[in-house]
Image (tube, grey):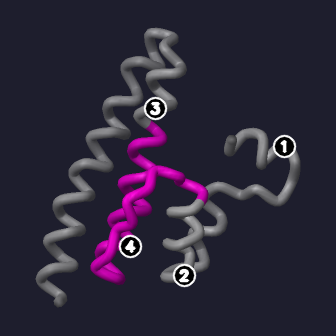
């Protein structure tokens, strides 16, 4: 099981980093929607990798709020990644 978790981590971490790198260039060109899309993909991949590494399961969904909620079961510090306690924080998240 440890080897499977390691393989998931290595595979998904490369993907996550790629999405983070890819969001930079559209942002610099003022293509904010495209940059936001890549950030969303990176976030989805990060949460998915946490779920795969700790539970060997990745749900077939793209809702980062739901994925984050599931990932937080493995580390409560993830609650701080996208704080949504205030209306302003919730608006920024959405």
Q: Is residue 12 above or below residue 18?
A: below
Q: Which residue is mark 4?
A: 51
**Is disc 3 surrounded by few (<14), some (14 to 19) or many (20+) residues within 10 Å?**
some
SS label for mark 3: helix
Q: Residue at x 65, y 55 (%)?
A: 82
What is the distance, in whole Å, between disc 4 and disc 2 at their CAs? 9 Å
**Is disc 2 surrounded by few (<14), some (14 to 19) or many (20+) residues within 10 Å?**
few
Along the viewing direction, whichever of 25 and 74 lies nearer the viewer: 74
Indicate the quadrant where residue 19 lies: top left
What is the distance, in whole Å, between disc 3 and disc 2 at their CAs? 25 Å
78 sits to left or right of 62: right
Q: Say the numbered circle drawn on residue 73.
A: 2
Q: Is residue 31 above or below residue 65?
A: above
- Say whether disc 4 or disc 2 marks the residue closer to the N-terminus: 4
Q: Which residue is mark 1?
A: 88
Relative image position of residue 16 (x, y in whole percent):
32, 49
Q: Residue at x 24, y 68 (%)?
A: 9
Q: Which residue is mark 3?
A: 37
Residue 75 counted in the magenta span: no
**Is disc 1 surrounded by few (<14), some (14 to 19) or many (20+) residues within 10 Å?**
few
Q: Which residues are magenta?
A: 39-65
């Amino acid at each position: 099981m440890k080897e499977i978790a390691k393989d998931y981590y290595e595979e998904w971490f490369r993907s996550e980093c790629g999405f983070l790198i890819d969001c930079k260039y559209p942002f610099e060109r003022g293509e904010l929607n495209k940059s936001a899309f890549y950030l969303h993909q990176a976030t989805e991949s990060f949460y998915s990798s946490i779920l795969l590494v700790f539970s060997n399961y990745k749900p077939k969904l793209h809702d980062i709020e739901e994925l984050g909620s599931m990932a937080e079961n493995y580390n409560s510090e993830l609650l701080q990644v996208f704080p949504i306690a205030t209306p302003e924080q919730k608006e920024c998240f959405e």
